[in-house]
Image (cartoon, rainbow, N blue to C red):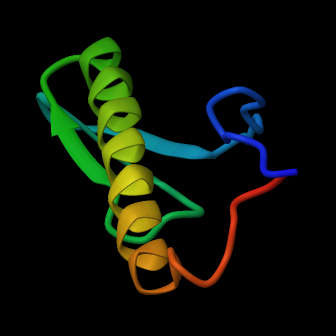
Amino acid sequence: MATNASENPVIAEYTAVIKQDASWWIGWIEEVPGVNCQERSREKLLDSLKTALRETLQKNRRSSSRPLRRQFMRAL
């Protein structure tokens, strides 16, 4: 029986590494290369990192499953 991933989401934790550099806040997600941002406030930086992480994971999921979509079914 195939399970739709959106019906039973897996909860993952990620580490945001952030610091203030002069008037900018900079940061990245430790576990996912390429997810990095800079903003003028800490709160905006954290929001931007969450958005960038979500978009990167969605893009990676689409590109990694595209060639195999006909051969496998997704299950948790």
Which corner quadrant of the image does residue 18 belong to? Answer: top left
- Indicate the position of residue 53 as horizontal and vertical percent values: 40, 45
Q: Nearer the viewer, residue 13 or 75?
A: 75
- Relative placement, left or right, of 16 versus 40 is right
- Relative placement, left or right, of 53 versus 31 is left
Q: Residue at x 67, y 41 (%)?
A: 5
- Indicate the position of residue 54 as horizontal and vertical percent values: 40, 40
Say above or below: 14 vs 11.
Answer: below
Q: Nearer the viewer, residue 5 or 35?
A: 5
Q: Nearer the viewer, residue 42 or 12?
A: 12
- Indicate the position of residue 68 as horizontal and vertical percent values: 52, 84
Say above or below: 26 vs 45.
Answer: below
Q: Residue at x 33, y 21 (%)?
A: 47
Q: Residue at x 79, y 51 (%)?
A: 2
Label total for image:
0
- Indicate the position of residue 74 as horizontal and vertical percent values: 70, 60
Q: Residue at x 61, y 84 (%)?
A: 71
